[in-house]
Amino acid sequence: MEQAKTAIILGATGLTGGILLDKLIKDDRYRKIKVFGRNHVSQKSEKIEEYLIDLFELEKIQELFTGDEVFCCIGTTKSKTPDKELYRKIDFGIPATAAKLAKRNNIDTFMVISALGADEDSNIFYNKVKGEMEGAVLEQKISNIYILQPSLIAGDRAENRFMESIFIKLMKLGNHLLIGNLKKYRSIEPQEIANAMRYLANHPYNSGRIESDKIKTLSNSSE
């Protein structure tokens, strides 16, 4: 029997990260789940090893950043973080540093949630930052790198974003109109992203960028 693994989750108090944590707690393939973040997670489990830290200072806890897989679910939005410098520190700085630590500590599986439309050459600041983050992660040449590029993520968030919730509902209504090459633009549920991440960590799959429609396919393949 394969030895039970240790997972690292960044962003476990967020929408997708919290769902992923629930799934790994129930998964017998994992004996320990290291959670790094500013706030306590709500879940209780003997598997959880929690570290309350400033994620901007990940380099300071290099010796604790050890395991078999890293799940980076860190991310913010324009409405939540309008300051561009802070946005970049979160969406670029944290994943890029985490990938460096993973490489340094010989962790051979690293996955990160990016966004559909990420492009380092984009004139749109937010797409450009995501694209630059992807490039920084890929530069580490970790054996198994999975960059998930979801479209608009549906689901109920703790913070109240009224206009965003209206937009998500409209997108859901219009999902069936997006067919063929447009399927990747359909909104996606956080459960689907979490399912896909768990699948990727435990099954052979080509490293690289994975667009939203492929994430849905992988989610449906998860056990």
Image (spheres, helix red, strand yellow):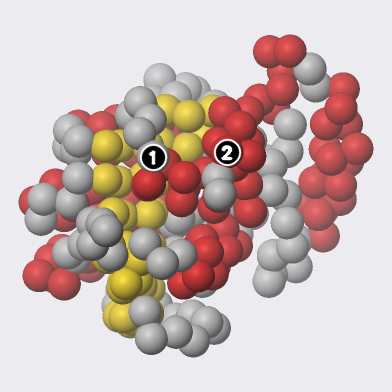
Q: Residues within 10 Å of mark 1 (few under 14, many from 20)?
A: few
- Picture layout, residue 100 above or below residue 132: below
Q: Earlier in the sequence, mark 1 or mark 2?
A: 1
Q: Which mark is residue 221?
A: 2
Looking at numbered disc 2 in the image, what kind of residue is underneath it? Ser
Residue at 18%, 51% in the rendered image: 107
Residue 141 placement, left or right of 70:
left
Answer whether residue 140 is visible to the viewer in this image: yes
Residue 168 placement, left or right of 153:
right
- Residue 131 x %, y %: 40, 31
- Pick the residue in front: 147 or 92: 147
- Residue 69 x %, y %: 28, 54
**Callout 1 touching callout 2 (CB < 8 Å):** yes
- Residue 42 x %, y %: 54, 83
- Residue 169 x %, y %: 86, 47
Residue 164 placement, left or right of 211:
right
For the residue labelled by badge 2, is the local secondary structure a helix, a strand or a loop? helix
Which residue position is annotated with label 1? 203
Q: CA distance from mark 1 to mark 2?
A: 10 Å
Q: Which quarter of the figure is the N terminus placed in?
A: bottom left
